[in-house]
Image (cartoon, rainbow, N blue to C red):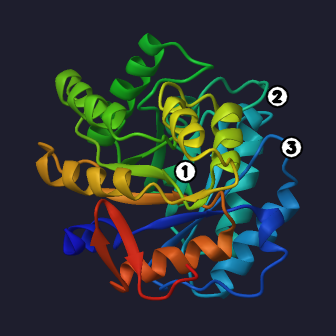
Amino acid sequence: MKEDIINFIEDFSVELNPKVQKKISDIHINKKNKIFITYLPESDEKEIFSAVEFVNTKGFIPVVHLPARTMRDIKHVEDFLITIRKLTKSNEILVIGGGGSQVGFINSSVDILESGLLEKYDFNKVKVAGHPEGSPDINNEILKEFLLIKEKIHTSKELDLEIVTQFFFESDPFIKWDVFLDKIGVTLPVRVGFPGPATFKTLLNFGLMSGVGNSLNFLKKNSNKIGDLLAKTSNDKMLIELATASKLSKLGRPNAFHCYPFGGFEKTCHWLTAIQNGDFIVENDKLIFHKKKI
């Protein structure tokens, strides 16, 4: 099982908030791993551009969020892509619907995927959103329709698409969603979104804000059992179950691993590196690290 876990997270990616980037001087992970740069509804694009430059200068591949509903219009999208292209040679980008209210005239990520701008500026490895537990903002039929459109774009255009999922707290919804993708004919690879080590309270707050669905019951049940919302968890059981699911899935999904650093970016990077280096043992569905302070 140890080797399965190492192989599962080997090609991991991790999120970096531009506001967090201003507080760090280096990134302590392997250069082969990618850094996703968040673009929240309230973000300052200057901070995003600064984060891209920082990540690129440190020798990593930045994968910038491009939230459709935050863009004013297609010209805004093009200007954004032009600026990113000046800062990095990365050909990867994450195109999502985005949170918050719609700012301009772009309704969804599909508008950007079909615009031709990604190909024009050499962003041909495109990450798109996936919601194993559904979305509080979009009904399931529309989510299904978008998945089928993205599958068609992947097979008919010069764009190599990969799904990156929202985070969740139990493996069962993902395993069922993988079966659902098979059933409707979606063959896209999936990079699974995983909540990095954090306290139950922190995870619960992020879960409630994001509306991730039924797996919030995991946090409620476990926090009550422990009786301490400040107890830290890395949800090792789910990590083990997802690594196992990857081997059993028809298309090897989840095919890759993406981490949301809710317990802190630097701490999460140390945790990921320790797993990648095999500095742990597996015991009773837990990862026991050789160094205690991970």
Q: Nearer the viewer, residue 64 or 251?
A: 251
* For residue 202, above or below residue 285: above
Instruction: Find the distance from the CA under tag 2 to the CA under tag 3.
Output: 11 Å
Residue 224 position, x and y percent, is 59, 37
Mark closest to the chain's N terminus, 2 or 3: 3
Instruction: Find the distance from the CA under tag 1 to the CA under tag 3.
Output: 18 Å
Q: Secondary structure at mark 2?
A: loop
What's the amino acid at mark 1? Answer: Leu
Mark closest to the chain's N terminus, 1 or 3: 3
What's the amino acid at mark 3? Answer: Glu
Find residue 102 and report its image quarter: top right
Answer yes or no: is residue 160 visible. no
What residue is shown at x 63% (from left), y 44% (from top)? 227
* For residue 189, above or below residue 172: below
Tell me the tag on residue 94.
Answer: 1
Q: Are marks 2 and 3 in contact (CB under 8 Å)?
A: no
Tell me the tag on residue 103.
Answer: 2
What residue is shown at x 38% (from left), y 33% (from top)? 150
Mark 2 Cα shell of 10 Å, populated few (<14), some (14-19), many (≥20): some
Q: Secondary structure at mark 1?
A: strand
Quadrant where the C terminus sits is bottom right
What residue is shown at x 76% (from left), y 46% (from top)? 40
Answer yes or no: is residue 254 visible. yes
Residue 170 position, x and y percent, is 40, 39
Mark closest to the chain's N terminus, 1 or 2: 1
In this rendering, which labeled residue sits more in front, label 1 or label 3? 3
What's the amino acid at mark 2? Answer: Val
Tell me the tag on residue 42.
Answer: 3
Q: Nearer the viewer, residue 99 or 283?
A: 283
Residue 87 position, x and y percent, is 70, 74
Instruction: Find the distance from the CA under tag 1 to the CA under tag 2.
Output: 19 Å
Q: Nearer the viewer, residue 153 or 207?
A: 207
